[in-house]
Image (cartoon, helix red, strand yellow):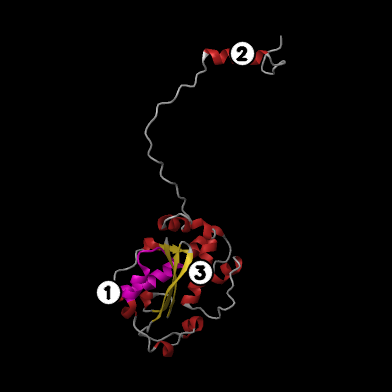
Amino acid sequence: MREIIFDTETTGLDPRSGHRLVEIGCIELVDRRESGRTFHAYFHPERDMPPEAEAVHGLSIQFLSDKPLFAARADELLEFLGDAPMIAHNAVFDFGFINAELERAGRPALDLARMCCTVQMARKLHPGAKHSLDALCTRYGIDRSHRIKHGALLDAELLAHLYIEMTGGRQIGLGLGAAESAAMAAGLSIRPAAPSRPFREPRAHAATAAELARHAEFVAALNQPLWHDSP
C-alpha cells in the first residue's frame, strides 16, 4: 500500500489570479510507514513574491531566482507521485495549484479522485475545534517545535504523523490495499463483498422418537419444574 503525503507553498491564494507554486514537498508512505523516499523542489514563479506570502514561508524572489521552472521537473514529480492516493491539509488548495502548473506545462491534470483532505477528516472527527495543522499537532501530541515558518517538506513530515494518528495509528492499515486505506481516510465505511458459496438445502432438525422419549424421561425426573402447571 503506497500513499503520498504532500504540501505546497505558493505566491498567493488563487492560481486563477496569476499566483504560482514555488515549493512542493512529498513523502512516500508504504504500509503506513515512511519509506525514506521524498520529492522536494523549489520553483521560480516567473513573477514577484508578495510580502504577505514571503512572511508565511520565507521564500524570497532572490532565493528563487536560480531555481528551475515547474515544467523542468514536472515529469520527475509525476513519476514520483505515480497513481498513489495523495493526502494534503486543505487538499483542494494544493491540487488546484499543482493542476494549474501541470496545465501550464502541457501535462495531464491529477485526478481529484486521488485526493484525501485531512482538514475534512478533522472536521468529522473534531467538529467545532480548530483544524489548522498547528492545532491538530497539539491535539495529537506531535512535536512541531522546529517549525518556525511554513515549509513544504517540513509540513508534509508533520502531516504524515498527523494522518497516521487521525486514521487510527499504524495498525489500521495492516492487510489493507490502497483503495481500502484511501476509503478509510476519507471516512467511508468498508463492507467486504459476501463470499460466493454454493446453495445448500437446510438440514432437518426435528427430534426423533427416541430423543423425545429420553427428553420426557429426563423432565419427569425433575423436582417440580417451573414450566409445568401446578396439579
How far from the left and from the top, in percent, is residue 194? Answer: 41, 41
In the image, which is nearer the foreground, mark 2 or mark 3? Answer: 2
Judging depth in this view, the residue of 47 and 213 nearest the camera is 213
Q: Return the residue at label 3.
A: 159
Q: CA distance from mark 3 to mark 1?
A: 30 Å
Extreme residue toward the top, this view: 231
Q: Which residue is mark 2?
A: 216
Alpha carbon separation for disc pair 2 and 3:
70 Å
Between the residue at mark 1 and the residue at mark 2, the CA separation in whole angstroms equals 86 Å
Splitting the image into 4 quarters, where does residue 166 fall? bottom right
- The reply, left or right, for residue 194 in relation to residue 103 is right
**Vertical side of 101 occupied by 126: above or below:** above
**Sequence-earlier tag: 3 or 1:** 1
Three-letter amino acid code at disc 3? Leu
Foreground pick, 25 / 61: 25
Tally the marks: 3
Relative image position of residue 98 (x, y in whole percent): 37, 72
Q: Is residue 226 visible?
A: yes
Quadrant housing residue 17: bottom left
* Segment tinted magenta in the rendering: 74-103
In the image, 16 versus 148, the foreground residue is 148
The kind of residue on which mark 2 rests is Ala
